[in-house]
Image (cartoon, coloured by chain):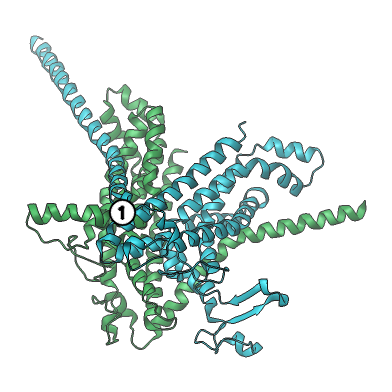
Chain colours: A cyan, B green
Amino acid sequence: MIAKEIEIKTESVEMNTDIKHRKRIGKLFLILIIIATLIGLVMLTVLLVDIAVKGADWLSPQLFTNYHSRKPEKAGMKSAIVGSIIVMGLTGLFSFPIGVGAALYLEEYAEKNLLTRFINININNLAGVPSIVYGMLGLVVFGRMFGAFSADSWLVTTFNLPIGETALGGLEFDLFGLSFLHLKFPFGRSLLAGALTMTLLILPVVIISSREAIRAVPNSIRLASYGLGATKWQTISRQVLPIAMPGILTGIILALSRAIGETAPLIIMGAFTYVPFLPESVWDQFTVMPIQIYNWITLPQEDYRIHLAAAGILVLLAVLLSFNAIAVFVRKKLEIKW
Amino acid sequence: MKTRKRTRFYSEKFISAILFACGIFSVLITIGIIFSLFSEAVQFFLRPEVSLLKFFTGTTWRPLASKVSPDNFGVLPLITGTVMIALISASIAVPLGLGSAIFLSEYASERLRSVLKPLTEILAGIPSVVYGYFAISFITPLIQTIFETWLGIDVSFFNALSASIVLAVMIIPTVASISEDAIRSVPQSLRAGAYSLGATRFEVITKVILPAALSGILAAFILAISRAVGETMAVTIAAGATPRVTFNPLESVQTMTAFIVQVSFGDAPSGSINGQSIFAVGATLFLMTFIMNVISDLIMNKFREVYE
């Protein structure tokens, strides 16, 4: 009897020290995961400070007014900034209708069948394809157009097309004889080819975010519109789209802000590293900010490699930040709360 | 009245056809990717200077060498370089991302979470060329100081470790957000059950929540590797351009993506062996990431089913 009591007592004492020990381990764990959470933020701070310290002195108006130069103190990224702006503008212009159209189809029209499921899986998979692969796609489809306009291609020999003299061949003409509708096939290493490549790259993200915005429109709005005798498209164009628009725009702006930092697809597609002029049409050669920065990073002189590159990055980050600020503004100002 | 109704009917049909075309467009992109990568890759393998077997088993990658022979087209150095960097960065990013996911979902107050989470997510929004810069301007000198000055181990300026570290930082938000989803999908009743049995918070997390969320965490790990494999600019800048089979992260290597960039800058004409070799490498890269994404998707769908 007594022995048993003692046994119970010792056991409970053991439990007591045990709980302290267990709690101590718990505290240690908490400290570890707080550190894990903070490491990312510390890295972010170090990165920003490192770039700011190395680039701040080189941040000058010349970055915006000069082209790349052999003298670091005179070098700028004018053509890259303009190139980035035009590529992003065109990309937004192309991806908006296709992305919203696809989102509308999937949310409002598509039936729940095998095809719809396949499209959904496909879009999710596309979002996970490395960006460099899109560059290769753009190169083949837009840059070269599968070689369909080279001298020995089936298309050219069959229709006897008047192609160019160079190895690549290529077809140039004014559509309807209008000089502003000047067309070139293939698109080559032009702004247009770059923008179309970027469009394919961001399209999955645009579709996914537009769908979320359209799905957030309450069904009662649709029903009320149908009740008043509106057709499906009238309901969508006059009720659903205006309500979903802030969400759609936010998604596109955020997608563009990711695209503006993308370097690899445009390098593969054939963007240039040195462009000492501003583009005059969408058929011109171009470069973009991240490619210009990459070019500076690879140069041997420290002024380019360390300082000018950092100054360029500061400009790029400022553009990125303002894109995100616009997105937040659009969402906050225009969003309708239910 | 009747004709108006009819035109309205046809315009409705017309619009739905256009929207359907937009919806099907994404499928065309996939077909385009597969067709453009593989048609060029097939042409590459049909060349007499290349052999499919030696491509996947050869350990020498010297496509730019003056002597063009199958022995110079072994892709293994690029694959080992890529896989080493991806594995190192995933093994750094997963503990950090998982730790931060546990903290944010189990410990942090809603207010703290609403501040910390967007801040962490900035890491994923910074362009990879910026990470590349950060790697050679800050991380590499730091590695050199630690290994060369303090430990006396040789480090090359372009090295896999530096690239892996910045890649890890870049993919932390991805890992954290998938892990957090997995942790949050563990039902509250399991937590309550464990607490009522007298378990401490640490024990609930390590013995109940993490095992229950294990498949989600595995999915995050695979996706992290896939992201790292497909990443381009940071590894191109930081890891160098020396294709070789090595498992020493302090040496310079070349990844598949870095090779593609290198050739693209070299202006390889279309139809040349180099111009085609990037498509063979690109197709390999695409297949690797595709398989990993599908596996990670399957795992994630499975754990969603278990608790729904």
Q: Relative to residue B44, is residue A100 depicted above or below?
A: above
Residue closer to the observer: B4 or B38: B4
Task: Tell me the quarter of the image containing the C terminus of chain A.
Answer: top right
Horizontal and vertical percent position of residue B27: 56, 63
- How many marks on residues? 1
Horizontal and vertical percent position of residue A102: 62, 55
Please name the amino acid that badge 1 sits on. Leu
Horizontal and vertical percent position of residue B285: 37, 66
What residue is rendered at 39% in x and 41% in y? B182
Q: Note whether residue B127 is visible.
A: yes
Is A17 left, or right, of A118 in this rendering?
left
Neighbours of disc 1 within 10 Å: few (<14), some (14-19), many (20+): many
Task: Tell me the quarter of the image containing the N terminus of chain A.
Answer: top left
Is A325 left, or right, of B11 in this rendering?
left
What residue is rendered at 22% in x and 29% in y? A26
The outermost residue toward the top is A2
The outermost residue toward the right is B1
The quarter of the picture where residue A34 lies is top left
Residue on which disc 1 sits:
B167
The quarter of the picture where residue B78 lies is bottom left
Provide the secondary structure element on which disc 1 rests: helix
Is A52 left, or right, of A179 in this rendering?
left
Residue closer to the observer: A170 or A66: A66
What residue is rendered at 40% in x and 66% in y? B287
Chain label for disc 1: B
Horizontal and vertical percent position of residue A140: 50, 74
Q: Note whether residue B301 is visible.
A: no
Residue closer to the observer: B220 or A92: A92
